[in-house]
Amino acid sequence: MIFDIRISFIVGLFIIICIALMIFNFIITHHSRGQSTPSADTVKKWISILNKQVTTTPDNTSGTLKHEQFLLKRLSNIEELIAYFHALQHRKSESLEAYNNYAHKQHEAFQKLADRYKKKSSTERACYANFICDFPDLAGNPYGHMVDILISYIDNSTVHCRMSVLRVLCSIGSTHGIVNALQVINDKHLFVHKQLLTDELLNFKGDKEILGAYLWSGALHWNDNIADSVVQFITRFSDSYNEVFLPVLQNSSIGAEVRIAIIRYYGKYVCEAAQPTLIGFITEPTNINLACEAAFALALYPTYDTITALKSALYRPEWNLRYSASLALIKMKNTIDLLSALENESNYATELVTYMLELEYMLSEKEMDGEIVIA
């Protein structure tokens, strides 16, 4: 009987704790939403302030200084910064010319404000960086002091804060800022997701060719994660790195991920000089991942040597290499060599080639059905 009472008490206590946690989470969530979403009245007040400020005469220096002091006082609070963000968006949509005139006069204020946020938490620093990202005109010169302050946000930061800094530097179009930020990230052994980094670099507002050249000059001195992103970034917009990348691809001391990224570059831009190296990866594979990527890239190089190498790869014991080789042959419309593999006694080849041919047949049937429906 006592044992049953104890069980009932424990179960009841557990239920009470669960209910308390639900209430606590609801309060925290509601409070967080309240902080991140400013009230309509607060936004309206900021809109009114901005309307008065943009209508002042350009030579009203005292009014500009007074407004600067007001911004420094109010926008040091993150909730006020969010409200100001919405008001400034409204001002920009109402009149781009008035917004530009206003932003041009506020460079010094927001540089000082950036310095103040340097002392705040990583989350608040990320918020300020994202704010400037949406209004890059407030940053002023892309090679000015504001950029150095934003790079300093990387110290003792979260991944989110680091990505926010890189995002705003791309939005400003600061080539030296991005290079310096990546140098800091590398030197401090900080993590950045390589795909997210590539995506941010692709949003760069300046000359991507110039940025690519600067990044590549430092890429091989950085960690493989960053170097991989740099190659991916260059691959998306430039076909002028054929000769530059080849010695790196041939250097076995370079990390496999970086070399795989370069192989994908040659899988997009044909380089006859790279063909022997790509063939070598599959005929004498020392790294199966390099071999698979090379096999797939060779689909763009339909020569006798390539086809011979791909056919030999069909008999390799590694399933993924056979798959990549057969996919390359299909991409070259070279089904004759695939069919010849069926006559061989190798189960490695016949098993996968049968699968790939059946898959190709089904896909072609679907394409034909789609054409009929469209017609």
Image (tube, rainbow, N blue to C red):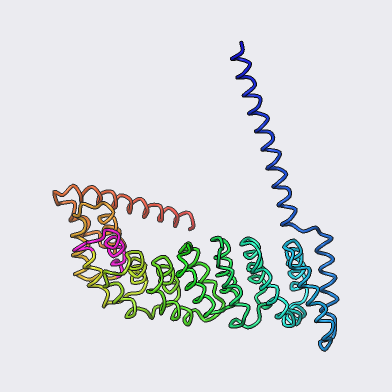
Q: Is 161 placed above or below 20 here?
A: below
In the picture, residue 270 is in which quadrant?
bottom left
Q: Which span is picked out in magenta?
A: 282-300
- Magenta-colored stretch includes residue 295: yes
- Image coordinates of residue 286 in percent, x first then y, are 22, 61
- Image coordinates of residue 171 in percent, x first then y, are 59, 74
- From the viewer's side, name the closer residue of 199 and 149: 149
Magenta part, dominant SS = helix
Q: Residue at x 28, y 54 (%)?
A: 320
- Image coordinates of residue 331 in percent, x first then y, are 31, 62
- Magenta-colored stretch includes residue 279: no
Residue positioned most to the top: 1
In the picture, residue 157 is in which quadrant?
bottom right
- From the viewer's side, name the closer residue of 70 and 116: 116
Q: Residue at x 45, y 75 (%)?
A: 237
Left or right of 158? Residue 272 is left
